[in-house]
Amino acid sequence: MSLFCSPIKTLYPKPYLLHKPHFFPLSDTKPRNLSFAGFPRRRHSPIKSCLKPASSSEIDMVRNKEGIFTPKEKKVVVLWDLDNKPPRGPPYEAATSLRRVAELLGRVVEISAYANRHAFIHLPHWVVEERRSRKSLDFAERKGEVIPTDPYVCGVCGRKCRTNLDLKKHFKQLHEREREKKVNRMRSLKGKKRKKFKERYVSGNEKYNEAARRLLTPKVGYGLERELRRAGVYVKTVEDKPQAADWAVKRQIMHSMTRGVDWLVLVSDDKDFCEMLRKAREADLGTVVVSDRDGVLGREADLWVPWMGVENGEIGEKDLVVETRRRRGFDEEEEGDGLFSLAYEEREESDGFGRFSVSSAFSEDEDEGEFELSDSDDDSDDEFSF
């Protein structure tokens, strides 16, 4: 019989098996130690988990757009309580200084400020004094009592004026009227035409905006909200209710704890935020408090920064060193050196089970830095100090 007439099983012969189809008969109850002489034994090692706990020294690496692994950036959120901590100087400079300090901790993803309407219509003392001195100087220049050394130059067209009042008059009569015409023209447009016109002639005219901030006086307040928005701060006006700004800040803190933020910068002196800072620290969130004094709120945070130093730009990277805070229990109730020992006592009527008591018999030698055993003069022989 030829190979072509053979069944298909002959084309692919089975390997020769030394054993029966069943390794052991069904009647046997004890399993036998099976050994395969034709196959080498393979030693199986136990499977190890690849999920190792990350230590504090490890650095998280992420892949960027170019495909290169770089250290993961820390995310920073800044929350500003304007009702409690308003800027003592120009708002734009204070906001930019605060952002510069927050950028030393990582990438700033959000800067939010919360206040009611009274914070935006209130005039601080430094604003009143500045306007009063400017007004008296304008009158002195008009009367000729004070002669300016350099002429006043218009920031839009470059025209030179003799006094500051002449410059204001020129700006209002010419540039402010042109601005109103452009705004009316923009309101008559719709869709893409309105958007392009606004970007080119209204919001994109930085020369006019800079000159208007310097020459025109706001009718209400001193332009706090406008200056903060110019610095990239999200300003939220809350309701005129007690503690409304505090509740808004607390809700934002709870939201930040679920966003994977690494650092929280709180600008406030209000001690009502102590409980929220404790929850943030329990959630492994770094906390920084910016206030006037290192009080109760500052002790609850990982780091305290003076508000005056932030406004003046005096805070550097060397000042943002996180100090190890002690636990609250040791801060409030600290006795002796804070060290303890365990003593075992056995009562006469007990069942043989003693009880442990904590005593302050464990002390430290301050000069040598070594631990010593204190001598106990108690009558009980079953008490040991170690």
Image (spheres, grey):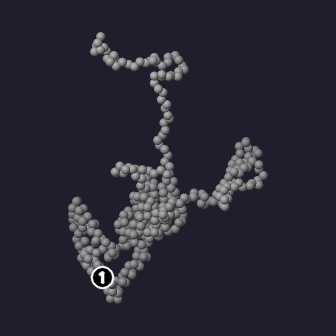
- x and y, in percent, of residue 358 in the image: 68, 52
Q: Amino acid at mark 1?
A: Pro
87 above or below 363? Answer: below
Q: Is residue 199 visible?
A: yes
- x and y, in percent, of residue 332 in the image: 60, 60
Of residue 179 and residue 344, the one placed in the foreground of this image is 344
Q: Secondary structure at mark 1?
A: loop
User: In the rendered image, which residue does mark 1 sit on?
Assistant: 151
The outermost residue toward the top is 1
- x and y, in percent, of residue 3 in the image: 29, 14
Q: Quadrant of the N terminus?
A: top left
Corner quadrant of residue 334: bottom right
- x and y, in percent, of residue 25 in the image: 50, 17
Q: Is residue 242 visible?
A: no
47 above or below 326? Answer: above
Corner quadrant of residue 174: bottom left
Question: Residue at the location (48% across, 19% down)?
Answer: 23
